[in-house]
Image (spheres, coloured by chain):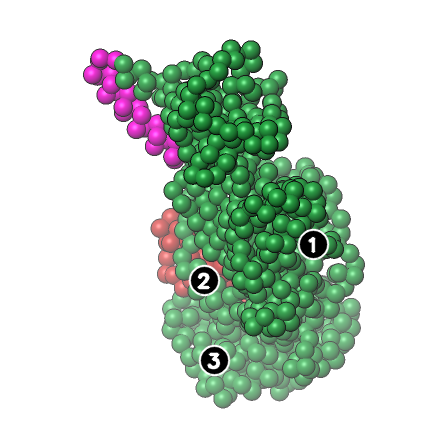
Chain colours: A red, B green
């Protein structure tokens, strides 16, 4: 599965990448915000998007909206990484079409559960 | 703290978060002059946010805690619920200091000490909406919080789950109560099938493609925000809730415009919610409010005239009392978004918040490039630099040999090598270049704090921050510059009262500038303060016993100013905690000399002072003047060399027991280098010799040498362990003809050998 990790903080990308690697997902790419991520998504055949919320340039939620608005990407499963499980935020993300969210910090196990849940849904 | 967390990641974090913290310090000071700058507030918020996020993974809890509250403060600020004041800035800057402190503890692999509770308390106070203009808002929020907490205690996740299921009920043919009791899986799965279908329809404007399913599902949706808002401990959402929310929302992706069928189907849902265990929550929602909510949610997909939208907005605000003030403002900006659903098939209400956050951010960084950088350990760069140095030396030798060779092909190859090596050298040097901004960045904060301490008003201007220079130099220059800037603020710029009395603007000005000048970097610290008084300096020098009266009187004004670099010289009678211990300036001088740099002071009484520092671009390669003593080569740093000439040694004079040479009516002390550096050399009476005039500090000195070889760029090699610290020698190099030349360190050589100069 080809996964795109979007975060403006490269340490965080690396952390997520390592966690995904621990889960056996080795085919990952990185982007540092929505503006860079979108063209990558449009040109590469990604199967899954993991994005941070709070980023300069284009935020995660805007990226999500752009993805959902794109005819070819609108079915792409999206996992949002957030700092808090703020209800407003999650509702906002859900309304925008997010498939799952995970609160920082998280472990590989938590990430796995989230991903499983998402694909259960997507494939279900 | 667990350091079993990947050490590499910790390293990354330290570097990257360190950069963010450096930026934060600049941005915070900037914020004081532009307190309403949204981009800046957002950037600072994001800075703390990012550091917090990274620290969370590394389990640096103390760091997380402090950043978290600081982040909240800026969240409040950017929402306009509080204004930036200098007191607030003091606390925030203190918080940043604390964070930096923790950071350095982490760097040393210690557990960071948690922030002082007082600081955290002060921060937390600031993280509450404040200020007079917000009284109304806080008033509505406070009473709301109380019942909400009650509810949060009463309603467990499970209950909430049931509540949500109850809300979903209309989508299922089964009676609502049974559904609530049944396991949620069946419902959601079935529902999800339908939802997926709808979701697909979402991108299009197929308003009634799957109407029968869509209507009930959509009807259930408005219920969700209602209990959600009511139960909401206000902030945290659980997984189960999220799942349920997703279930509902996906149904909502449909643009169910038809209000008439929707409304009735919701009606049963509302009582259901009320009859579920979460009764207290249900109590909060009246049918009217519910209707309003419905209107609002449906309105999102439709073209709701602004006037109509305003009302549900208020309703929503009162229902979702737990949500802080933002909620009430949210639906309002939604209007413009709602009016153009064609490009935004996603629910509009969510858009404005993000749009607000994104727009300024996007403005400051239109398109970030894909990552093209790699972090490299500086030790590795040093190693490469060293190897390039070796290569340069070999090249020099080959070039020299090539000159004597008749072989044309050989000469060609050598000249080719020459060019390539030079390019390689420049490229490698460039990899080590860093903008001086790294050092300059700390000054706004420094000056701000000092000025506040000393009750002065000072504007700091930074010029040429982008000037690149060698990384080692950037680091080495930090301390001297801090000292000089402190001096400019403390001793240079006067108090506002004094300035006004002198007919100057109240606010003093300190300019810190950097520019490249050939192979040198020129750094200047200029202030428009009171300047220096040459006579006072003269008197001081005599009083301190540094000079006798005659010598002091003979000094030009310029030389007087440079007296401040003499060891043990301080004109300030009282010692302030800012500067003025009289040890600083000569340390500055020594430090800059070590970098093969020079420092000079210019001043005009009443107008201000300017300190000019000149340092080479890099420390690894140095232009030198090669000289010979007997058969041994020595290299003078070219930066010190003033002039060279041939002298008839019989035309020297002796003044005060010191041999001097008169150059353009100035008597310069003259030394025979050979007597110092070549022991047992045959002490013949030289009749004539080559003299190299060097500038050392504010003084000029002549050295007699046997032979002048010429100018040569050398790669500095440190002396071996046994020889390290030999006075007068800063290193060694291999010359083009393959011999070893010692590089002279003139100040330390004078200290060691000259009796007195």
Quarter of the image for residue A42 reads: bottom left
* Image vertical order of residue A104 relative to residue A23, above or below: below
- Same chain for labels 1 and 2? Say yes or no: yes
| Residue marked by disc 2 | B364
* Front residue of B200 and A14: A14
* Image vertical order of residue B97 relative to residue B668, above or below: below
Give how far apart the Cα atoms at labels 3 and 2 are: 26 Å
Give how far apart the Cα atoms at labels 1 and 2 are: 46 Å
Q: Is residue B419 magenta?
A: yes
Say which chain tag 3 marks. Answer: B
* Image vertical order of residue B49 relative to residue B631, above or below: below
Mark 3 or 2, closer to the camera: 2
Element under disc 1: loop
* Front residue of A7 and B660: B660
Seen at 49% across and 13% down, the residue is: B684
Mark 1 or 2, closer to the camera: 1
Quadrant showing the N terminus of chain B: top right
Element under disc 2: helix
> What range is drawn magenta here?
B405-428
* Front residue of A87 and B419: B419
Upstream in the sequence, badge 1 or badge 2?
2
Say which chain tag 1 marks. Answer: B
- Judged left or right of residue B92, residue B637 is left
Q: Position of residue B523 (x, y in %)?
A: 49, 48
Crowding near pointer 1: few (<14 within 10 Å), some, many (20+)? few
Seen at 76% across and 64% down, the residue is: B121
Q: Is residue B376 magenta?
A: no
């Amino acid at each position: 599965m080809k996964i795109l990790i979007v975060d403006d903080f490269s340490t965080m990308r690396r952390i997520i990448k390592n966690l995904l690697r621990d889960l056996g997902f080795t085919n990952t790419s990185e982007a540092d915000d929505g503006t860079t991520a979108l063209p990558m998504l449009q040109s590469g055949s990604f199967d899954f998007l993991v994005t941070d919320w709070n980023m300069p340039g284009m935020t995660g939620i805007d990226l999500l909206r752009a993805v959902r608005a794109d005819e070819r990407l609108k079915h792409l499963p999206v996992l949002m990484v957030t700092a808090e499980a703020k209800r407003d935020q999650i509702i906002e993300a859900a309304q925008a079409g997010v498939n799952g969210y995970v609160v920082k910090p998280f472990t590989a196990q938590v990430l796995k559960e989230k991903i499983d849940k998402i694909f259960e849904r997507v494939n279900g | 703290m667990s350091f079993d967390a990947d050490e590499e990641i910790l390293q990354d974090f330290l570097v990257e978060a360190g950069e963010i913290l450096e930026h934060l310090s600049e941005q915070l000071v900037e914020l004081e002059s532009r307190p309403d700058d949204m981009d800046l507030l957002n950037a600072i918020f994001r800075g703390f946010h990012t550091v917090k996020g990274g620290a969370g993974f590394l389990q640096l809890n103390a760091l997380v805690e402090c950043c978290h509250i600081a982040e909240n403060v800026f969240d409040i600020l950017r929402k306009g619920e509080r204004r930036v004041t200098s007191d607030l800035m003091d606390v925030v800057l203190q918080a940043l200091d604390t964070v930096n402190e923790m950071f350095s503890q982490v760097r040393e692999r210690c557990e960071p000490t948690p922030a002082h509770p007082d600081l955290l308390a002060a921060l937390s106070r600031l993280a509450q909406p404040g200020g007079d203009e917000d009284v109304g808002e806080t008033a509505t929020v406070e009473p709301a919080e109380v019942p909400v907490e009650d509810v949060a205690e009463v309603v467990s996740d499970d209950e909430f789950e049931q509540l949500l299921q109850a809300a979903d009920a209309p989508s299922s043919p089964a009676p609502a109560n049974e559904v609530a009791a049944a396991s949620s899986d069946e419902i959601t799965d079935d529902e999800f099938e339908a939802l997926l279908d709808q979701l697909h329809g979402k991108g299009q404007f197929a308003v009634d493609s799957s109407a029968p399913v869509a209507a009930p599902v959509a009807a259930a949706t408005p219920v969700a925000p209602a209990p959600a808002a009511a139960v909401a401990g206000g902030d945290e959402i659980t997984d189960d809730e999220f799942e349920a929310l997703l279930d509902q929302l996906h149904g909502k992706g449909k643009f169910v415009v038809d209000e008439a069928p929707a409304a009735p189907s919701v009606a049963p849902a509302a009582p259901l919610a009320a009859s579920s265990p979460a009764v207290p929550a249900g109590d909060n929602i009246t049918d009217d409010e519910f209707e309003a909510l419905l209107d609002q949610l449906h309105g999102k997909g439709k073209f709701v005239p602004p006037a109509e939208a305003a009302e549900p907005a208020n309703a929503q605000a009162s229902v979702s009392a737990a949500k802080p003030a933002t909620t009430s403002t949210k639906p309002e900006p939604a209007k413009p978004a709602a009016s153009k659903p064609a490009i935004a098939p996603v629910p509009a209400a969510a858009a404005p918040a993000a749009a607000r956050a994104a727009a300024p951010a996007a403005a400051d960084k239109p398109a970030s490039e894909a990552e093209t950088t790699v972090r490299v350990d500086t030790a590795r760069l040093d190693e490469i630099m060293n190897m390039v140095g070796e290569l340069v030396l070999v090249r020099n030798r080959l070039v020299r040999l090539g000159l004597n060779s008749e072989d044309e092909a050989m000469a060609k190859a050598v000249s080719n090598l020459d060019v390539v090596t030079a390019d390689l050298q420049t490229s490698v040097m460039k990899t080590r270049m860093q903008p001086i901004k790294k050092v300059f960045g700390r000054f706004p904060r420094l000056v701000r704090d000092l000025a506040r301490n000393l009750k002065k008003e000072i504007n700091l201007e930074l010029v040429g921050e982008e000037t690149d220079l060698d990384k080692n130099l950037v680091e080495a220059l930090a301390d001297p510059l801090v000292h000089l800037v402190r001096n400019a603020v403390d001793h240079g710029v006067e108090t506002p009262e004094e300035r006004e009395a002198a007919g100057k603007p109240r606010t003093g000005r300190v300019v810190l500038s950097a520019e490249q000048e050939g192979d040198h970097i020129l750094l200047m610290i200029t202030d428009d303060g009171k300047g220096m008084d040459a006579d006072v300096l003269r008197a001081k020098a005599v009083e301190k016993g540094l000079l006798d009266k005659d010598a002091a009187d003979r000094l030009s004004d310029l030389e007087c100013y440079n007296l401040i670099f003499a060891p043990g010289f301080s004109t300030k009678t009282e010692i302030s905690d800012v500067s003025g211990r009289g040890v600083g300036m000569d340390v500055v001088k020594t430090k800059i000399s070590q970098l093969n740099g020079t420092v000079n002071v210019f001043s005009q009484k009443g107008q201000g002072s300017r300190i000019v520092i000149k340092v080479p671009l890099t420390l690894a390669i140095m232009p030198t003047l090669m000289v010979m003593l007997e058969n041994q080569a020595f290299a003078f740093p070219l930066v010190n060399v003033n002039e060279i000439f041939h002298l008839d040694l019989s035309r020297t004079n002796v003044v005060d027991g010191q041999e001097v040479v008169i150059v353009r009516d100035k008597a310069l002390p003259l030394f025979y280098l050979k007597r110092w550096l070549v022991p047992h050399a045959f002490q013949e009476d030289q009749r004539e010799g080559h003299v190299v005039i060097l500038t050392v500090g504010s003084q000029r000195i002549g050295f007699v040498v046997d032979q002048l070889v010429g100018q040569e760029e050398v790669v500095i090699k440190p002396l071996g362990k046994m020889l390290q610290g030999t006075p007068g020698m800063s290193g060694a190099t291999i010359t083009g003809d393959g011999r070893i030349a010692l590089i002279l360190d003139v100040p330390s050589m004078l200290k060691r050998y000259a009796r007195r100069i």
